[in-house]
Amino acid sequence: MTKWIIAIFVLLGIDQGSKIWISSVLTQGESIPVIENFFHITYTRNTGILFGGLQGTAADYFWVFLIFAILATGVFGYMFYKSDFTDKRLFILRLSLTLLIAGSLGNAIDRAVQIDHAVIDFIDFNGIWSYIFNFADTFLNVGIFLFFVDTFFLEKKRAVVNG
């Protein structure tokens, strides 16, 4: 279990460290092209929710956002804690929960400590879509994907073997 907890803190450090760095070297709205017309580092502050929905509502719904993040982290943490760490077949489940916990905490910290309760976003694939995101968002999306893979495919295989 210890290596997984360390992984959560490492991922959280990557997320928070990158946000601190971006907000200290760029001004809001400033963009640095990494691959012109495809990938940029663009400093934005997301005051809404997923994919920029409900923009400008962070202050109005601060407690809703924060409570949801705390509840999600609690649920993921409980599942993580109850996981059988001796069963190597649960690797994908533990990885998904590790990513989900780190992602939930990363964005919750932004909501709690940023003066405008916004989440700092900066990963900008403007050649593909208009959404700008951060590492915590990536952890959440990959974690959700892996969780569904484990739930709908791997769990069935484990049940057959245990059956």
Image (cartoon, rainbow, N blue to C red):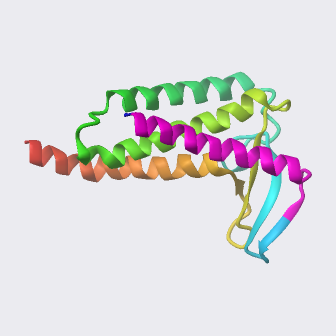
User: Is the C terminus in the top left, top right, bottom left or bottom right quadrant?
Assistant: top left
Q: Is residue 61 visible?
A: no
Residue 143, given in percent of the width and then of the height, sits at 47, 47
Residue located at (54% from left, 46% from top): 140
Residue 85, given in percent of the width and then of the height, sits at 29, 36
Outermost residue on the bottom side: it is 36
Residue located at (64% from left, 38% from top): 106
Q: What residue span does the magenta drawing correspond to?
A: 2-31
Residue 65, given in percent of the width and then of the height, sits at 67, 29
User: Is the N terminus in the top left, top right, bottom left or bottom right quadrant?
Assistant: top left
Residue located at (66% from left, 32% from top): 108
Quarter of the image for residue 68 reads top right
* Number of marks: 0
Residue 162, given in percent of the width and then of the height, sits at 10, 42
Please check the rendered image and state whether residue 89 is part of the magenta-colored stretch, yes or no: no
* Closest to the observer, 92 or 11: 11
Residue located at (18% from left, 51% from top): 157
Judge whether 113 appears above or below 53 on screen.
Answer: above
Question: Is 140 on the left or on the right of 124, as rendered?
Answer: left
Judge whether 36 appears above or below 46 on screen.
Answer: below
Q: Is residue 6 visible?
A: yes
Judge whether 154 appears above or below 124 on screen.
Answer: above
Judge whether 134 appears above or below 87 on screen.
Answer: below
Q: Does the magenta stretch mainly form a helix, a strand or a loop?
A: helix
